[in-house]
Amino acid sequence: MKEHHYQTKVEWTGNKGSGTDHYKNYERNHNIIVEQKAVIQASSDPAFLGDPTKHNPEDLLVSSLSSCHMLWYLHFCSANHIIVEEYTDTAEGIMLEEQNGNGYFKEVTLNPIVIVKSSDMIEKAIELHKKAHEYCFIANSVNFPVKHNPIVKTK
């Protein structure tokens, strides 16, 4: 079995001068830094006093699931001679927050819309979503269901 390592640096940028002396006295802003890649400016969700103009961990988790699924899907389409011309996904995640502030994701639903070159590719293209899900590293790593509502069509 191959082992792959990933390293990121998270750097808090939200100290407004008094550190974390009070819950409302600091910003949740931070940078996500991966060597030789663009810095991602992030914050917490606005519900938790975050900056609504920045990505938050919940956005990134849902995006990671969507991106991973898409990359495997495109691979399997290519290997099966399914020509994908366009792919978009509006993924949605549901997170539950308990009264004590603890929270967890209940589910994520991927809603990919795929345009294939010809109508004879549609049936196999729909089927390959299941295989992409089985191989997705991120989906295999979470403890909640990742659902799929694919639409495959031609132009």
Image (tube, rainbow, N blue to C red):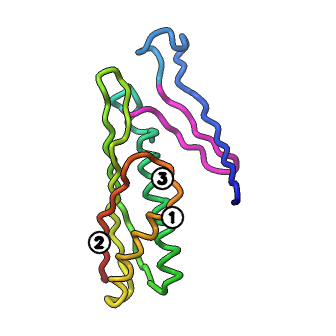
- Image quadrant where residue 13 sits: top right
**Residue flagged by tag 2: what amino acid is it?**
Ile
Residue 88 position within the rendered picture, expressed as x and y whole percent measured from the top left: 38, 66
The residue beneath circle 3 is 64
User: What number is the disc on residue 15?
Assistant: none
Secondary structure under the numbered disc 3 in the rendered image? helix
User: Magenta part of the protein: which range?
Assistant: 28-45
Give me the residue at 57% from left, 27% from top: 12
Cα gap from disc 1 to disc 2, whole angstroms: 20 Å
The residue beneath circle 2 is 151
Contact flag, marks 1 and 2 (Cβ < 8 Å)? no
Asked whether residue 144 is drawn in magenta, I would say no
Asked whether residue 36 is drawn in magenta, I would say yes
Residue 18 position within the rendered picture, expressed as x and y whole percent measured from the top left: 54, 10
User: Residue 85 vs residue 21: left or right?
Assistant: left
Secondary structure under the numbered disc 1 in the rendered image? helix
**Residue flagged by tag 1: what amino acid is it?**
Tyr
Residue 145 position within the rendered picture, expressed as x and y whole percent measured from the top left: 36, 51
Cα gap from disc 3 to disc 2, whole angstroms: 20 Å
Give me the residue at 44% from left, 84% from top: 82
Question: Which is nearer the N-term, disc 3 or disc 2?
Answer: 3
| Residue nearest the viewer, comparing 82 with 40 | 82
- Image quadrant where residue 106 sits: top left
Give me the residue at 31% from left, 83% from top: 154
The residue beneath circle 1 is 135
